[in-house]
Amino acid sequence: MYRSIYVPVDNSDYSNQAVARAVELGRAFEARMVGSHVYAARMHDYRFKQMEYTLPEEYLEENELERQRKIHDSLITMGLELISDCYLEHMDRQCKEHGLVFEPRRMDGKHHIEILKDLEQVPCDLVVLGALGVGRGRDSQIGSVCERVVRHGRGDVLVIRRLPGEAPDTARDTILVGIDGSPQSFGALVTACELAERFGKKVEAIAVYDPYLHYAVFHGVVGVLTERAAKVFRFEEQNQLHEEVIDTGLAQIYQSHLDVAASVAQARGIDLKKTLLDGKAFQKVLDHARKTDPWLLVIGRIGVHSPKDEPGLGSNTENLLRLAPCDVLITTRLEVPELDVRAEKSIRWTPEAEERMKRVPPLVLGIARTAIYRLAVEQGHSVITSAVLDDAMERYMPKRAAEVTAKLAEAVAFERARAGQVSICRACGVSASEAEPVCCAVCGGTTFQVVTEEMLAQIAALEGGALPESTYDGKTLLWTQDAKHALWTLKDAYRRRRVKARVEKGARGRRLNTITLDFARQYIEEETGEPLVVESGEAAAATESAASDGLKLIARDEKKNPLLSRWAWTAEAAERVLRVPAGFMRQRTQARVEELAAERTVETIGLELVEEGIDLGRKLMEQMIVGYDEVRTQVKPAQREKTPASSEAYLNEVGILSALEAKRRGPSV
């Protein structure tokens, strides 16, 4: 597959790892190895001439200045050439150790320009280079040389993003490949399969479709249209069309891409794992890569929505190049599955069918034609007619799709939700059209999560009740109090609106009329990239109640439990008391500290007072333990077996704790 491998080197950590990985690939494919280094002698000479005016007077005499120029030029050029030789010698040694043919190359000039020019002169199948170089900083995502070589190069590029020592390669056994139905993605799959065969790895294909984009766009547009324009645009009908027709069809088409990918891999003796997700493509692939930690991510340079002659990178590829936590192989290989080749060659279209296809939006025309071809092959058709198109509509859209498309009736979307039961496929998350499904129409899964109105009502009651909210197109969804509190953890208003739109869309797509905390959590965490921590409805209500009682919120601990008080607290004092375990112990400690503050009439509680209150608590505990032992000696064995295991709980039960507290405070006035 790779007969020659080209590696730009600069002696950085990522470059050295690129050399190691290139040699590993070279051994697997018996490839010829080429190493290059670009030095910048001309740039140094130019800079030296710019600085000549700063030299002492004795060096500015013409003969002396010319002599200095020659010395500088020769020393700089010679020194940089020696450095290049040393860098390349490191790669040469590794190649010789494994019996690989090695060719060193060195150039003077601008790094990425010289590398790209050299790649036009030196035939190679793969470029391996580090994501970052010697100039990397704390927030660097990708080096300028790497970015420009990847963007303007014409061949496969393996970008090294993982340094050695993070985890052994043996712990990573999967090659993850992105599939979107394009020849580029199937080319990436074939490349991944060949690498898996050579290195003994598994292959997982991931496909992502986005049912949320139109909803977020409509949600943002509705507020700026006049009433008349909104009526012309007909948001409700547009949304209904997407929810009942387009979104489900997209899910099925992308699942068919995975099924075709599985057949391609099976022909090569590889059992492919398939993963279908919904959302933003690069974000879902990125999250999945972070979760599964693959050995390698393989993607095409461009995707299904890019023009065939696109010279740069697709947007998803660009984002994954910058953010992926693993090495990324960007391929240029084109592969059309045998199924699609056979369909293109053997199947014709009637004029009527071609005319109907002209009404398909250009953005999805390629996807639609591929899906129809695959259906025709499956059913044995040699000519695609209007009847075949009708069959395709029936397959890739829910039942009653024609009626939905024609009438765009509001009642259909929530019909089964109002009927009291929704079945959601556990494998792909798509809700079933039938009341009691046997098999998922998208992924073929056979296990379903059944959600009823009664279940949602019980959850809503536990989460502080549910209040109705109108969506932008007039529908009504119920949000539990906990779900609303979770949404408001997003302080940025734009992000909050965007996530709210995604949550609403997700609920409507699953035919759920109540949004719970667990349902909203997945979208909020996907937006922030962090675990969601939110007060329960009871905790939030307690905070609001405390505020009405004159208590102020001082601080919160890591789990967002509040510290409420009538006193002012210094930051050190608040931090110290929040280190006391939450619950009874913290409440008692705070009470003791505030009692001391009241006795001494202080306005602000400081660290010293908190430490005194904690020390007082320790002494009370010692007295409790002594009292506990005295009581235990007086309790009969039968009664002793029934006493609580916790000494504190037992002492509370027999009244010792309250007695000790009363003794400490003295007689009441």
Image (spheres, rainbow, N blue to C red):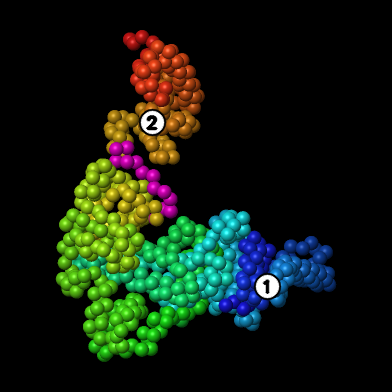
Which residue is farthest front? 638
- Decide which of tag 1 and tag 2 comes sooner along the chain: 1
In the image, is 290 to the left or to the right of 396? right
Residue at image coords 39%, 19%: 640
Q: Nearer the viewer, residue 214 or 355?
A: 355
Q: Which x, y percent locates residue 450?
A: 26, 55
> Helix, strand or loop at disc 1?
strand
Q: Is residue 449 above or below residue 333?
A: above
Q: Nearer the viewer, residue 593 or 16?
A: 16
Q: Which residues are magenta?
A: 527-539
Residue 534 falls within the magenta-colored stretch? yes
> Helix, strand or loop at disc 2?
loop
Which quadrant does the N terminus fall into? bottom right
Q: Is residue 81 above or below residue 123?
A: above
Q: CA distance from mark 1 to mark 2?
A: 63 Å
Residue at image coords 41%, 25%: 646
Which quadrant does the C terminus fall into? top left
Overall secondary structure of the magenta stretch? Answer: loop
Pointer 2 local density, CA inside 10 Å: few below 14, some 14–19, many at least 20:
few
Disc 2 marks which amino acid? Gly
In the image, is 86 to the left or to the right of 171? right
Say which residue label 1 marks: 35
Query: Which label belongs to residue 583?
Result: 2
